[in-house]
Amino acid sequence: MALRIFAAAAFAFLYIPIITLVVYSFSEARYFTFPPVGFSFKWYVTLFEDRELLQSVRNSLIVTGIVVPATLALGIPAAFAIDRFDFPGKAIFERVVLLPLMVPGVITGLAILLVIKGVDMRLSLTTVAIGHTVGWLPIVVTQVYARLRRFDRRLEEASMDLGGNRRQTFLRITLPGIKNAIIGSALLVFTLSFDEIGMTFFLTGTQNTLPMFIWSMLREGVSPEINAVATITIAISIVLIVVGLRFLGKEKD
């Protein structure tokens, strides 16, 4: 009984603020009053008329548009290397690839910032994308590697015995077998990159991403516009995470 009460209290602590944020995003009043006054979509309309907000969304999409293909291009070969080959330093390679998952994003961002400053590279959306790629690369590696561990390699051998070359076997046998892991991890990377603020704080230049735009708005206090943009972000994140986990869940069936 005590465990159930503790669990309920923990969930309430986590989710009641989110629910409150969503509820007040539809309030007509500009300032927080309890109970909320009226019901209105005007704060959402105000958001979509904000050019700086729309530009920050575009910037976030530009970053994720770089990060997702980059993590896939690097993560899939890395997963294959770990699964299919034995080479000197393999154990160290695995740990190095997975290290960003164990290090806080702030530390990763600071470390990458020092490297970028060392090569005299200007901070921009590109540097943000580099940081996010390093940070979320392990997501792709772990998910694709887990699927490869369960993949029946006799299917590849049968394809080769029937005359298929390595390229044909990969495209027609291996890739379809791991596609759900690829799609699921890509959606998770998109969501994490779109919402990331720790690494972005150190690596962004003059162009704000959406999380950084929200952060800048908070300096003036919590307003209904912040509630509205946070509600939209939460909704998009939940949808993408659920879809991504469904794809990854199919791989386990």
Image (cartoon, rainbow, N blue to C red):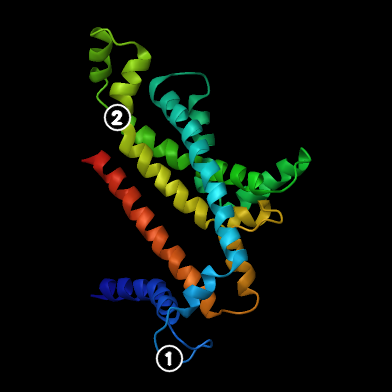
Looking at the image, which residue is at 50% across and 46% down? Answer: 101
Amino acid type shown at disc 2: Pro
**Mark 2: which secondary structure?**
helix
> In this rendering, does residue 238 appear at all?
yes
Q: Quadrant of residue 161?
A: top left
**Mark 1: which secondary structure?**
loop
Looking at the image, which residue is at 41% across and 38% down? Answer: 142
Give the side of residue 198 with respect to residue 34, left or right: right
Q: Is residue 21 above or below residue 91?
A: below
Foreground residue among 14 and 223: 223
Give the side of residue 191 with respect to residue 212, left or right: left
| Quadrant occupied by the N terminus | bottom left
Foreground residue among 201 and 171: 171
Q: Quadrant of residue 119?
A: top right
Which residue is the site of mark 1?
37
Q: Position of residue 213 (x, y in %)?
A: 61, 64
Task: Look at the numbered discs 2 and 1 and tell me whether their residues touch, using CB distance below 8 Å.
Answer: no
Q: Position of residue 159 (x, y in %)?
A: 25, 14
Which residue is the site of mark 2?
176
What's the CA distance linking mark 2 and mark 1? 52 Å
Foreground residue among 233 and 115: 233
Q: Is residue 60 above or below residue 93?
A: below
Looking at the image, which residue is at 47% across and 29% down? Answer: 78
Amino acid type shown at disc 1: Val
Residue that protrudes farthest toward the left in the picture: 253
Q: Is residue 45 above or below residue 126?
A: below
> In this rendering, does residue 149 appear at all?
no
Q: Which is in the foreground here, disc 2 or disc 1?
A: 1
